[in-house]
Image: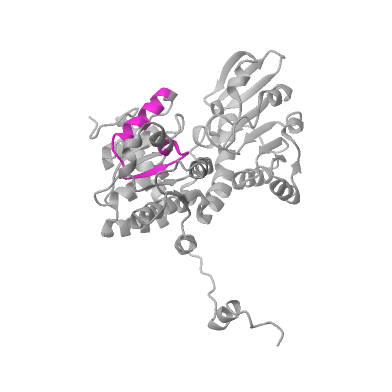
Amino acid sequence: MLTVNSDIKDITLAEQGKSNIEWAAKDMPVLEQIKERYRKEQPFKGLRFSSCVHITKETANLCIALKEGGADGVLAASNPLSTQDDVAAALVKYWNIPVFGYAGEDKETYKKHVDIILEHKPNFIIDDGCDIVATIHKSHRELIPDIIGSCEETTTGIIRLQAMEKAGELKFPALAVNSSMTKHLYDNRYGTGQSAIDGIIRATNILLAGKTFVVCGYGWCGRGAAMRAKGLGANVIVTEVNPMKALEAAMEGFSVMPIAQAAKVGDIFLAITGDINVVDVPHLLTMKDGAMVCNAGHFDVEVNVNGLKKETTEIKKIRPHLEEYKLRNGKSIYVLAEGRLVNLVAAEGHPASVMDMSFANQALGAEFIIKNRGKLENKLYTLPESTDIEIATLKLKSMGIEIDTLTPEQYQYLNSWSSGTAN
């Protein structure tokens, strides 16, 4: 029997999910400290939140922290393939958090779940890709007066919010969590860098050493993936549209070239930009026989899988998250995780220790929105630098690392315009 209204795969998986949530919590000490404070202070008492995020053991701990702070929350999956069904079951059974999502749900079910969690009439939003916020502005505008604000997890979602703000369409404040240094610097570089490679290896069981590994996009996620692939012995090529990022990649020792050129020589292609058709049909058709393509950016649009299907005579499932596309030109292209986020579909997403900082930002971001109710404009905000410092300090403490502090003399020197100048 489900204890709350939900749409999940199998409630009998709850015991394993509980174990996984508790295991992740052991490696999330910063969020744990915030949760303990929330339990005492109850900053969200009487407030409702709707969250559309990846349903993993790490995000479960975020939702639990918000509930401990008094929030009445519901949760939907932000990706039809990334849901960890045991975690969803555990949230329902042991924490009485309604969950709407299961691995393998179709797009129509996904959209239905987003609509369902909006029936909760939220006061604040936890979003991953701006889907809740966009849906509210498109078709549920009656909810806007009661919404205090939203927190956005991803670069893609922030891009959408920026466009909404620029067009004057954003009707409540939003917080760009991904813009916090302790989120994007560590989550994207170290989290995505490791988990994307993990997903590729789990899906294929290939050796990366000696392979030509093409990273499309050299943002923080791309930097991390390129660094990890290089560390495993791959020959890394970077493709970019930004001259500054391309120059940085070149200075880091990577080959830099257009995707049309890289397509002819690459063995593995990882699109990691947040944009559409980064690896497009013309690129796919010129690839080597046996080339592998995947995405760790956002949604299933970075690799043009729908366009590839039109050039395909047969699609054959090789392994759980690996499909062979036999093309009319006689070649085969291998698509990982159906073109969706390979790190979440074929693996388990980021390690808990890095998500600890990301979700500390989410939790403190929600508190920031609530504390500043009525004071914020309908704009996109970033958490103050002091929050980054707080999170980094807590993380270092949990790792047993001590650092120096400035002496009064040093502080005075750094904050004076006259010291150190010619007299």
**Label tally:** 0
Residue positioned 66% across, 33% down in the render: 269
Does the magenta segment cover residue 234? no
Q: Is residue 320 above or below residue 58?
A: above
Does the magenta segment cover residue 125? yes
Residue positioned 58% across, 16% down in the render: 316
Residue 149, given in percent of the width and then of the height, sits at 38, 47
Report the side of 186 relative to 152 (left or right): right
Q: Nearer the viewer, residue 19 or 79?
A: 79
Q: Is residue 345 above or below residue 407?
A: above
Residue 204 visible in the current orientation: yes
Q: Nearer the viewer, residue 15 or 220?
A: 220
Residue 73, given in percent of the width and then of the height, sits at 30, 42
Q: Nearer the viewer, residue 163 or 383?
A: 163
Q: Is residue 407 above or below residue 100?
A: below
Colour pattern: one colour
Work out which quarter of the rendered image holds the N terminus and state it.
top left
Residue 329, given in percent of the width and then of the height, sits at 72, 14
Work out which quarter of the rendered image holds the C terminus and state it.
bottom right
Residue 312, given in percent of the width and then of the height, sits at 63, 15
Report the side of 328 relative to 369 (left or right): right
Residue 106 visible in the current orientation: no
Residue positioned 26% across, 40% down in the render: 96
* Quarter location, residue 212: top right
Hey, which residue is sitting farthest front in the picture? 168
Residue positioned 73% across, 30% down in the render: 263
The span shown in magenta is: 108-133
Hey, which residue is sitting farthest bottom in the picture? 423
* Quarter location, residue 235: top right
